[in-house]
Amino acid sequence: MELRRRDYRVERPLLNQEQLEELGRWGPAPRTRPWRTSLQCSGARARALLLKHLPVVAWLPRYPVREWLLGDLLSGLSVAIMQLPQGLAYALLAGLPPVFGLYSSFYPVFIYFLFGTSRHISVGTFAVMSVMVGSVTEALAPDEVFMQAGNSTDVKARDAARVRLASSLSVLVGLFQVALGLVHFGFVVTYLSEPLVRGYTTAAAVHVFVSQLKYVFGLQLSSFSGPLSLIYTLLEVGWKLRQSVVGAVVTAAVAGLVLVAVKLLNDKLKRHLPLPIPGELLTLIGATAISYGVGLQPRFGVDVVGSIPAGLVPPVAPSLAPRLVGNAFAIAVVGFAIAISLGKIFALKHGYRVDSNQELVALGLSNLVGGVFQCFPVSCSMSRSLVQESAGGNTQVAGAVSSLFILIIILKLGELFRDLPKAVLAATIIVNLKGMLLQFRDVCTLWEANRVDLLIWLVTFVATILLNLDLGLAVAVAFSLLLVVVRTQRPHYSVLGQIPDTDVYRDVAEYSEAREVPGVKVFRSSATVYFANADLYSDALKQRCGVDVDHLISRKKKLLRKQELRLKRLQKEKPQQQAAASTGTSVPIEVNISDGAVKSHDADGPKAQVSTEPEPAEPAASGQDGAQAPGGCTLKGLGLPPPAFHSLVLDLSALSFVDTVCIKSLKNIFRDFREIEVEVYVAGCQAPVVTQLEAGHFFDASISKQHLFASVHDAVLFARQHPRSGPASPVLVTKL
C-alpha cells in the first residue's frame, strides 16, 4: 500500500546538551549492586538457587506423564540405538578401547539430565570432540613409546596410558566449564561466530575422515601430532596403500553402502514410519554375526573390536597434568559452543529458554563426573539431537531412558560385540560425517551473502587443516577478532546532506537528492572512534571537507611570523626616524602589513608615512557568538583563501564509547578547524558518551556543552543562525 504524503510542522527550540539536560532533568542512573542480592540469606533465596542450579527439581514434579511419557520413551530408545554404535566408533576415534565410548554414553548423559536446561539436545560422544581428544592421546601416548621386541606394540599398556590421559582431560574440561559457568562467563561463546564454528567443524570432519582411513584399509600407521599432521597421515596412507587388507576394504564398503541405503530409505519414508529404521544398530548386529560366523579376523585378517568387559569400572582419581591445560580449554569452549548453539535452535523452535551459564555448569559436571569414571570429554551430537526431537522427545527424560539402555548393554550385552569389525565402525563414522561435510556448500552461499564471513570460514578451515585442531581454533579466533578491529579501522565516512523538506540527513554520495547545507559541513563515521582509528578519522575528515587544513594552518603561521618580524624591524627603525626628524632629515618608509609588503625610498624623498597595525596575537577560539580575531590575523587579512564553509558538524551518533585517544583527537579537531576560522559542533552523542567525555575532561573554557546538540538538524540550524564569519543565513524550516 502506497503511503500518502502528509506535510506537518514541528516547532520546538533548538536544544544543545546543556538545555537538553535541564529540560529532561538529566542525572546519573542509580547504581545497582547485584552482589548484595546474591549475598542475602533467606529461604526463598536458597530455594531459588536450588531451582536454578538443579533444574530437574523445577520441571520433574510438573511433568505431564500422560502427554509426554510415551514420546520420551520412544525417543530415548531411538537415541540409545544410535548411541550404541556411535559410542563404540567414537571411542576408536579418541584412540581408546570401544568400551570407554559406552561409559561416555552413560555417566555424562545422566548427569546432564539432572543439571541441563535444554529439553532436546542429546549429550554424549561427538565426532569433533572425539577427534580433538584423539589428537591429544596419540600425541602424548604414541605407539612408538610402547614398542616391544619384534616390532610389536604393547596394546594394553598403551590403552591404559591413553585412558588416563583422556579421563584427566575430561576432568580439566569439566573444571573449566563449571568455573566459567559459575562466574557467568557464558558469553565467551559469542567470540565464536557462526562462520567460524561451521568452518571449524568442517575441518574437524576432514580430520575425522582421514583418521578412519587406517581402519578402512586395515593399515598400521604412525602417530603424527602438531602442525601438518593431517598431511603426513595422508602421505603415509598413500605410501602404504599397497599393504591394504582386502577384507577390511570390502567390509567397510559393504557396511557404508548399507548405511547410506538405510538413510535414504528413512528420508523417503519418514512420513510413513513412526520411528526411523535403526540402520546403524542393524548393521552392527549383522556385521558382528557375519564376522563371528565367517571368521573375518582369522581368515581374512580383519581387525575386530576384541574383548569388551562387562560391568562398570570403579572411580579413579585423575592426575591433572599441566600439559593438558591448553587442549582442555579449547575442548571446553568448542564443546560448549556446539551444545549451546543447538540448544538455542531447539529452544527457539519449541518456545522455552536455555540458560547459557547453567548449560556450562551442566556440561562441566557431566565431563567432571565422567572423567572420574574414566570417560572422555563429551558434548552434544547434532544427528542424535535431531532424532531425539523428531521422534517425539519433550524433555531430558528421553536422555535418561537412553542412558539406562546403555547401562543394560554395558552390564549384560557388551561382550556380544567382541567380533565387531573396526572397519564397520569406521564406515559408521564416515557416513555420519555427511552433514558436516555438506557444509562445504557454505563457500558458495557466503560468496554471495558476505565475503568477509567467507574469509573467516576459509581461514578457519585452512588453519585447522594445517595446524591441527587446537592451534587452528586459536588462529581462527585471533583472526576473527583482528578482522573486527580492521573493519572498525575502515568504516564508511560520509559527508551528509539534507533531504529536501525533511530533517533527515544522508550521504550525498549515495542520495542524489541530498543537498549540503550552505556554509555547514556535516561529517559522519559509521564506526565508533577509538585508539585504533582516531588518526584515520581525523585524516578522513580533513580529506572529505575539501580543505588542506594542515597546509592552511602552516601558511597562516608563516605569515604571522613574518608579520611579527616586520613589526620588530619597524620598532627598531622608529628611533632612527625620530633622530632623523630632529636633524631635519627624513627617512620615508611605507609599511603595509596587511599585504605583507615593505617599501623603502631615498632619504631625500617626501616625509615619512608610517602605517602600523596592532601587534598580531594568536586568534582566540571563539564560542557560539562568532567573535572574530583581529582583522590582520584573519585568513582574508593574510591573503589566504578561507574555507567554503563556516561551521563543521560532527555526527557522533555511531559512538558507543570514547577513550582518551578519541577525546584528544576531538579536541585537536576543534583546535585545527578554529585555526582556519571554522566553528565545530557535535551532534547525536548518547548519554553514556557524554558522561565519558566529562570524565575525560573534554569540556573546558573553549569547548562547552553548548557545542553539543541533540540531533544533526539542531546543530545545523544553530550553525546557520550563528555563523563564525559572514552574515547570518536564513533559518531552515523543518517541513515534513
Image (spheres, grey):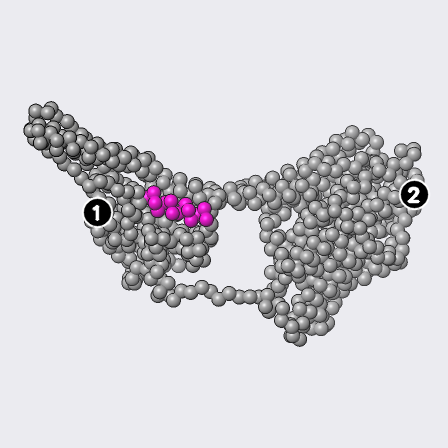
Residue found 82% across the figure and 51% down from its top: 100
Q: Is residue 551 visible?
A: yes
Q: Quadrant of residue 33?
A: bottom right
Q: Quadrant of residue 7?
A: bottom left
The residue lying furthest to the bottom in this view is 43
Residue found 84% across the figure and 38% down from its top: 145
Q: Are the two marked residues, 1 and 2, in contact with CB atoms closer than 8 angstroms?
A: no
> From the image, which quarter does the N terminus lie in?
bottom left
Foreground pick, 219 / 168: 168
Q: Which residue is mark 1?
A: 726
Crowd band around label 2 with a 10 angstrom C-alpha radius: few (<14), some (14–19), many (20+)? some
Q: Quadrant of residue 240?
A: top right
Foreground pick, 299 / 185: 185
Q: CA distance from mark 1 to mark 2?
A: 102 Å
Q: Residue 324: give x, y in percent of width and height.
A: 74, 46
Q: Relative to 497, say whether 312 is above or below.
A: below
How many numbered discs, if any? 2
Q: Which residue is mark 2?
A: 295
Q: Relative to 593, say whether 93 is above or below.
A: below
Q: Is residue 259 visible?
A: no
> From the image, which quarter does the C terminus lie in?
bottom left
Residue found 84% across the figure and 45% down from its top: 161
Residue 663 magenta-highlighted: yes
In the rendered structure, which amino acid carries the disc numbered 2? Gly
> Which contiguous range is marked in magenta?
660-673
Q: Main secondary structure of the magenta part?
A: helix
Between circles 1 and 2, the one closer to the viewer is 1
Residue 536 magenta-highlighted: no
Whichever of callouts 1 and 2 sits on the residue coming sooner in the sequence is: 2
Q: Residue 509: give x, y in percent of width and height.
A: 36, 43
